[in-house]
Image (cartoon, rainbow, N blue to C red):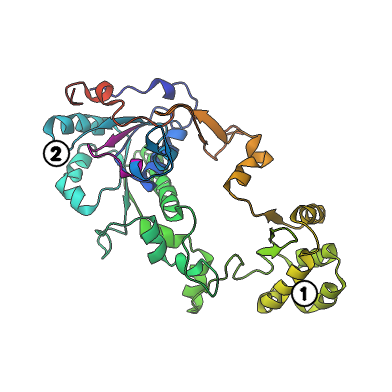
Amino acid sequence: MRWSIAEANLDTGLPLEGLRMLDFSRVLAGPLVAMIAGDLGADVIKVESPTGDPVRALAPPVFGGDATYYLAVNRHRRNVVADLTNPEQRAAIEDLVRQADAVIENFLPNQYESLDIAGLRALNPDCVWVSITPASSGTALAAEPSFDLLAQARSGLMGVTGEADGQPTKVGSPLADVVTGLYGTIGLLTGLVARLREQPGRHFEAPLLESTMSALVNQAQGYLATGVAPRRHGNDHPSIVPYGPVTTSDGLLLLAVGTDGQFARLVECVDDDELRALSARWATNAERVRERVALAEELNRCFARATTEEWEGRLRAAGIPMAPILDVPGAFAQTTIADGDFVVTTDAPGGELRMMASPLRIDGVRPPVRSGPRAFGQDSSDLLGPATAGE
């Protein structure tokens, strides 16, 4: 069967227009790769097993019968259901694989073998193949199922997150999956560039464990270079002070004072005689890091004199980096977001759905959301044929 590009993906002017991609992945990291490719114009077909992507049931919250977790990362692709152990349905999928420019999958090693995924890949040696894995192939954890929470725990990320005297804490969003998905996307795009240079299809692997560990960045490098294990500092920075929250008369405000000059301006802006008298001993960042507790006490005393809004105005006028600590509704209520084009309305099985568009802008323009998430097996008949789709 010929793979025809979906109408929504024609004449878009987007950089990946005309490229065909198959998405066999489930949950979040792999689907994020496919969604980014779709946002950039690729024609993507998601292939679900008869049991479906388990993220559809990770609820509440639910919108129109689907978990919003599923809706978050499954726009810009048509949806088919196929049993790869069924010869007729497998043949239809094999036909799509032969025409694909790229494939995204996250099969575990036992699934890779039992479903003969290597056989699928052999059908199209020029195809860019992206695998999301628990850990690097051939390692002790490669065959062990993993999820965002487990990756956050194993990676050391939880070890540096939380209050100093409290328990390790996970990040409030699925950061491990997101970072892994972004590395998978880098692999996908790199493979497509290699194809333009007439190199054969490459196999890119984005392992969840190592991708999450890469998010440690300075924390990991500090340990590797010195052997000193990083500690938890709550919302404060391990190497920069003051770089965290202060308490105002009605809440919290985040300071990001990264230079000695900014600190000097902060002292003048606060305009407190006691702080000014003590500031000489905190003139350098090294001194401030060493005495972070004493400095925090002074700043909290000073900032308790006015409201968060009042301090925002004063600090902004002084050119001191700061931000209010917003909840999710507050983040979406900001003028930049509320009056911009980042939140859009699109179609979904449950009706009109508000969702975030791509954060990327291309030549000053954000790529439009051309189609929303699809229902389970919505396109099976059109793409695989009525008989193959079980009708």
Q: Position of residue 244 (x, y in %)?
A: 65, 64
Was residue 49 drawn as part of the magenta stretch in this picture?
yes
Dividing the picture into quarters, in which one does residue 361 lie? top right
Q: Is residue 200 above or below residue 312?
A: above
The label shown at residue 85 is: 2
Q: Secondary structure at mark 1?
A: loop
Q: Nearer the viewer, residue 340 or 68?
A: 68
Dividing the picture into quarters, in which one does residue 41 lie? top left
- The reply to whether residue 261 is visible in this rendering is no
Q: Position of residue 104 (x, y in %)?
A: 32, 42
Q: Are marks 2 and 1 in contact (CB under 8 Å)?
A: no
Q: Nearer the viewer, residue 50 or 307?
A: 307
Dividing the picture into quarters, in which one does residue 302 lie? bottom right
Q: Is residue 368 left or right of residue 85?
A: right
Residue at left offset 55%, top offset 70%: 163
- The reply to whether residue 152 is visible in this rendering is yes
Q: Is residue 318 above or below residue 354?
A: below
Residue at left offset 36%, top offset 45%: 58
- Name the residue at the left extreme: 87
Residue at left offset 85%, top offset 69%: 272
Residue identified by numbered label 1 = 283
Which region shows up in magenta? Answer: 45-56
The C terminus is located in which quarter?
A: top left
Residue at left offset 16%, top offset 49%: 113
Q: Nearer the viewer, mark 2 or mark 1?
A: 2
Q: Secondary structure at mark 2?
A: loop
